[in-house]
Amino acid sequence: AQSVAQPEDQVNVAEGNPLTVKCTYSVSGNPYLFWYVQYPNRGLQFLLKYITGDNLVKGSYGFEAEFNKSQTSFHLKKPSALVSDSALYFCAVRDMGDGNQFYFGTGTSLTVIP
Amino acid sequence: KAGVTQTPRYLIKTRGQQVTLSCSPISGHRSVSWYQQTPGQGLQFLFEYFSETQRNKGNFPGRFSGRQFSNSRSEMNVSTLELGDSALYLCASSPSTASSSYEQYFGPGTRLTVT
């Protein structure tokens, strides 16, 4: 069955430290992978995507993500966290073998501690 | 371009009533998807419309329905509201083309509270 897993409900990191938000996926076809961020009382904002090519993709606000096909993972990373990065992060996959349907993870709440 | 707009932003209804939510996609986008977001369940896919046709459907009861108009605007209807329908309902539009990588753009959501 198609799915997206974000194993951590909550991630805390000190300001200035590197951060990682984990995501693994399971799809039947080739995946298109996305990360979105949600601030309180707002909709989801697109951060970055992986379609093909380099396994390391760069996105908005200094975020990047690494696609690992063998581990079916697409972890979100940032070298130096800011307090303003505190938000809810969603990993999503578009399963190109399943009617192009989108699947979202349950979200990871990131708190950056000053 | 203007972003995805959703109306109303907030809504309070009573159990048993019905509600209609509206979504206007980004100009030129032909695909509109609806999601229900709750603290315990995350984002759950309701349905996707493309060129006025329902293209995909999630696992929700028949009380949840939708439609899309020729201008790509979409409405979602929930009949016989239950307390468990209280949630943030998000609409997302997409060009739905390979060149766009099927990226979705989200509106701010409609916060529905059922009492």
Image: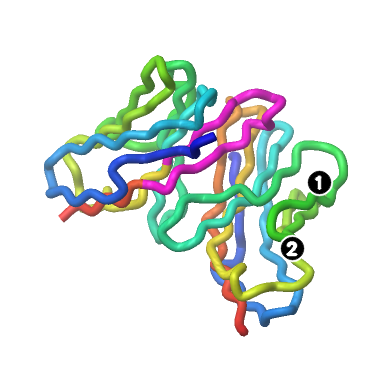
Q: Disc 2 marks which residue?
A: A77
Horizontal side of A108 relative to B36 (left or right) equals right
Secondary structure at badge 2 equals strand
Horizontal side of B76 relative to A3 (left or right) equals left
Count neighbours of disc 2 (C-alpha within 10 A) and say few if under 14, some if 14 to 19, many if 20 or more: some
- Three-letter amino acid code at the position of disc 2: Lys
| Residue occupying the point 76% across, 37% down | A51
In this picture, is B23 found above or below B81?
above
Horizontal side of B7 relative to B108 (left or right) equals left
Outermost front residue = B1
Residue A71 percent coordinates (x, y): 79, 52
Q: Disc 1 marks which residue?
A: A69
Q: Quadrant of the C terminus of chain A?
A: bottom right
Outermost right residue = A54
Q: Which residues are magenta?
A: B91-109
| Disc number for residue A12 | none
Residue A48 percent coordinates (x, y): 69, 48
